[in-house]
Amino acid sequence: MAALQILPRPQAPCSGRSPAPSPASSAATCCTMSRSPSISLKRCSCYRYPSRYSHGIPSDGGIRGKLTSSAVPAASFASPSTTADAPSDAATAPLSTPSVSSEASAEVELMKVTTDSLQYESGYLGGISGKTRPSWGTSWTSSPSSFDRPSAMDYLAHTLTSRVYDVAIESPLQLAPRLSERLGVQFWLKREDLQPVFSFKLRGAYNMMANLPREKLEKGVICSSAGNHAQGVALAAQKLGCNAVIVMPVTTPEIKWKSVEKLGATVVLVGDSYDEAQSHAKKRAKSEGRTFIPPFDNPNVIMGQGTVGMEIIRQLRGPIHAIFVPVGGGLIAGIAAYVKQVRPEVKIIGVEPYDANAMALSLHHGQRVMLEQVGGFADGVAVKVVGEETYRLCRELVDGIVLVSRDAICASIKDMFEEKRSILEPAGALSLAGAEAYCKYYGLKGESVVAITSGANMNFDRLRLVTELADVGRKQEAVLATSMPEEPGSFKRFCQLVGPVNITEFKYRYDASKEKALVLYSVGVHTAAELKSVVGRMGFENFETVDLTNNDLAKDHLRHLVGGRTNVENELLCRFIFPERPGTLMKFLDSFSPRWNISLFHYRSQGEAGANVLVGIQVPGGEMDEFRAIATNLDYDYALEMSNKAYQLLMH
Ligand SMILES: Cc1ncc(COP(=O)(O)O)c(C=O)c1O
């Protein structure tokens, strides 16, 4: 993750529709970026950010990915890119008629960007460019209704009359007393984790399916998902008495596909990735006449999710400063479409992980973009490309996007456990992390904020990592590396210098070839000042100390590898994401070995779909092109880590 610079603490953005402060709003520019969905980013060498912001657009605007998108919308509330049915005569149907759309497609080229190309301090309301925002809702309220783009009034009316309560509950809105006290605000939790399938996703799925005509329902539905959408579609199908096929990647954990099967749906395991599963589902939709139920990019799905916003407004009568929503896209679009019509002064703020910031980047560039890689920790929001309709709504209605770290999400899972004894999945805790960071950043006091606890389908294996990182995320634990003379008495002196601070982890191994020993350890801290004084004390006594608390490489791998510190010739250190499927390791070894020596290998299962693996490979300088070609051909995401400070310190 790119280093972040600290921004000066501004005032909380005022209520109402004035644009949020945005890095890009003051950017100097000499060219216009296209807002059209048929993307073309002009090369723009003079586009600059104020120097206090650490982010920027990629220097190469020319890398492009390809998506297909239909050109001819065929029916009301159909989102061109996500429906996979034959054109129908529904063009003349009333608005509540089910949506179908031609999949006949025009290719839309999307600019590929890296998540690192837009990073700002956690809590800061970014991701909205004043330059690219149409004009704060005016085109939204005045634009006419069309088949695939319902009007503001359509969204309001259909959300109000949605039938989600056949299957969903009106979830409680509960005060979080500890968080409220800690932050000095009224911190409200909208408990969507208490829904029948432990997430809000059933609202949108049911709303779309309940609006399908009988003959469509009889032909059955199909969707692709390895997560909460799958369970939503399965439960909705059970209630409506229709046949459902759920296509999941073969890597889906048994517990997930079994729970979908238990709801009566037919599970088909196809492909290694979500994209492969989706393309299979769309093909089957066409050949079998089934209706494809998209996870977010469809007006009926969005309207169903909008009922969450409707309930919040009904449940919380007084002033509301902001509603924080995990993004995805469908949930925030639905909530914004409703709330901005009835209570426009309430801010709708999206929350994304730093490494899954597709909406922030799309809003920032004024066009949908494709992430080159997306972090999978909060898998519910691991979206590489945001939807066309969700983007259209968010661009006009959302007040900004707050970015949060994986550690902060873990801390919020712990907060929720302490508040309500409930365990949220990472995407489910995302909005808590965003709301907390925002309240601290803008120094909010006394206001009411709402965070949507969107899901509780936690993979149990991940709890180990969550508990490991939660205190770091709360800034109550720091990871430090200290170098000290390799001589008798050093260790005792070190302990004296650490002083009263509690050491929670300690790693050291003797290396006879070194004059200085390096220890890696974690300490429990209560305040930033306490940490600063420990680091300062050490430095003063020539025990040079580096704070690695924000270094994911150190936390995920190197803390478990201390003792492996040697000078290995020509060692490349790479982080690979191994797909969790049989044969992955063999394929990796076939590619690189015995061509080059593998000098290090560290794998730690964290219950994610892709395993995070650290590999050392000895590749002579002249063979780097060959290495890159093989690594690219292997098609596992990877990054070189030799310049990582933690590697230099601990492993070199
Ligand atoms: C728990 C959870 N939160 C948030 C989201 C994001 O939803 P959306 O894509 O509708 O914005 C999802 C999506 O599956 C989810 O499962």
Image (tube, rainbow, N blue to C red):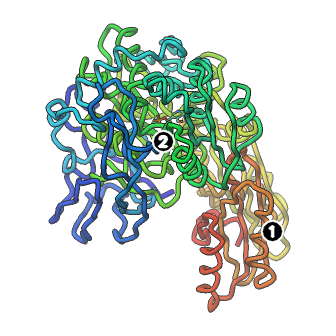
**Residue 366 drawn at (x, y percent):** 27, 52
**Residue 609 drawn at (x, y percent):** 68, 49
In the picture shown, does residue 646 fall above or below 400? below
Residue 435 at least partly seen: yes
User: How many other residues sit within 10 Å of disc 1, few (<14), some (14-19) or many (≥20)?
Assistant: few
Residue occupying image coordinates x 43% and y 30%? 301
Q: Residue lying farthest bottom? A: 622
Which residue in the protein does label 1 denote? 586
Q: Quadrant of residue 406?
A: top right
Q: Amino acid at mark 1?
A: Met
Which residue in the protein does label 2 denote? 404
Q: Quadrant of residue 531?
A: top right
In the picture shown, does residue 320 fall above or below 302? above
**Rounded to the nearest whole Å, what is the CA distance between mark 1 and mark 2?**
35 Å
Query: What element does badge 2 sit on?
Result: strand
Residue occupying image coordinates x 76% and y 63%? 584
Q: Amino acid at mark 2?
A: Val
N-terminal label among 1 and 2: 2
Labels 1 and 2 touching (C-beta < 8 A):
no
Say which of marks 1 and 2 sits in front: 1
**Residue 133 drawn at (x, y percent):** 21, 45
Q: Nearer the viewer, residue 91 or 67?
A: 91
**Residue 114 drawn at (x, y percent):** 45, 60
Residue occupying image coordinates x 67% and y 37%? 466
Q: Nearer the viewer, residue 441 or 160?
A: 160
User: How many other residues sit within 10 Å of disc 2, few (<14), some (14-19) or many (≥20)?
Assistant: many
Residue 550 at least partly seen: no
Q: Nearer the viewer, residue 10 or 38?
A: 38
